[in-house]
Image (cartoon, grey):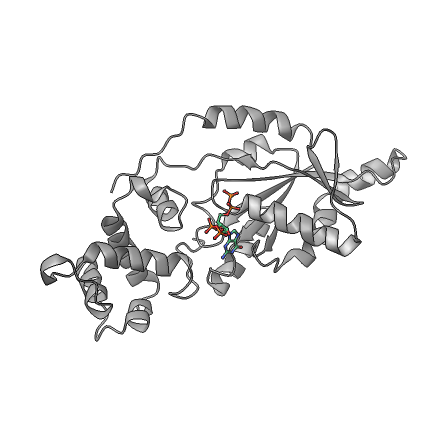
Amino acid sequence: MQIQWYPGHMTKAKRAMQEDIKLIDLVIELVDARAPLSSRNPDIDELGRQKARLILLNKADLADENCNRQWSQRFQEQGYHVLKVNARSGAGFKAINDTVAQACKEKIERDRRRGILNRPVRAMVVGIPNVGKSTFINSFAKKAAAKTGNKPGVTRGNQWIRLNKNLELLDTPGILWPKFEDQEIGLKLALIGSVKDDILNMEELAAELVKLLHGLYPHVLEERYGFSAPEEEPWKALEEIAKVRKCLAKGGAYDTEKAAAMLLDDFRSGKLGRITLEVPE
Ligand code: G4P
């Protein structure tokens, strides 16, 4: 399956990010916990070098808890600070302030040595489309404001959101471009909903999901749809779903297209359970 999606505005986004990164101390990189590697763009390591780094495994509520732990450990071994969060509910936010202080320890101490007191850490949120950047910024700003009893203060021409006396956030996230050269990566991004569905063949995509699930979570389809036997053959699995869920096309044939959309929706919304599509090697 070929997935092509190279938006032309990415060059512009990269240039904007290069400028914004000069203003900050800390890069808060959001990845999708269901595919933490595919939803990263390693170019951020080059762009964000010499900055403190925090990776947020977002949508941790949809991902396999065991894999969340493994990925946290893997990224920590690679030198990043890591937290798992749910940007929608705010789960995991409590630890952010302490982790930011740890990640920026050197900067804070350097400031102190120079007699600069109370200069907040400045951070920006980055990530590929749909990882939850806007949700995170909005809900983190709200939580921080509720805690301090203030509205998030905005300084410098609407650019900075003051979350508390120690942390300011750029109000617009940096958009990273996904790595589509690798078809495996493109496939996982399509599955987690980072590629617009209207350019995809949903049946082919659902068939690829069946194949992946068969290797990673062999009983999950059986549990959800009640097949009599787990289906290894992706197209047959779609027919089974159509049968069980009574997806019928005109003339009474099984509507595998509808079944495919249903399967993808069940996966993306967590109805199949907490699933991670890639594990650390
Ligand atoms: P972006 O700025 O990085 O492009 O992503 P955005 O915040 O728009 O989030 C993309 C989708 O992911 C949104 O759903 C959002 O609610 C959802 N989302 C973000 N963080 C989390 C999380 O931690 N857990 C879960 N389960 N979902 C999360 P949507 O369907 O596009 O919109 P809506 O239904 O929330 O309106």
> As displayed, is residue 235 above or below residue 108?
below
Q: Position of residue 183 (x, y in %)?
A: 31, 41
Residue displayed at 35% across by 57% down: 265
Left or right: 6 with respect to 169? left
Residue with the most extreme left position: 251
Residue with the most extreme front position: 250
Between 43 and 59, which is closer to the camera in this rendering?
A: 59
Left or right: 135 with respect to 146? left
Left or right: 5 with respect to 1? right
Q: Position of residue 36 (x, y in %)?
A: 47, 49
Residue displayed at 28% across by 62% down: 214
Q: Position of residue 116 (x, y in %)?
A: 87, 35
Between 201 and 245, which is closer to the camera in this rendering?
A: 245
- Quarter-of-image position of residue 27: top right
> As displayed, is residue 41 above or below residue 67?
above
Residue displayed at 73% across by 49% down: 102
Q: Position of residue 196 (x, y in %)?
A: 36, 41
Q: Is residue 192 visible?
A: yes
> As displayed, is residue 177 above or below residue 148?
above
Q: Count numbered badges in the picture.
A: 0
Q: Is residue 80 visible?
A: no
Look at the image and tell me in which quarter the N terminus lies: top left
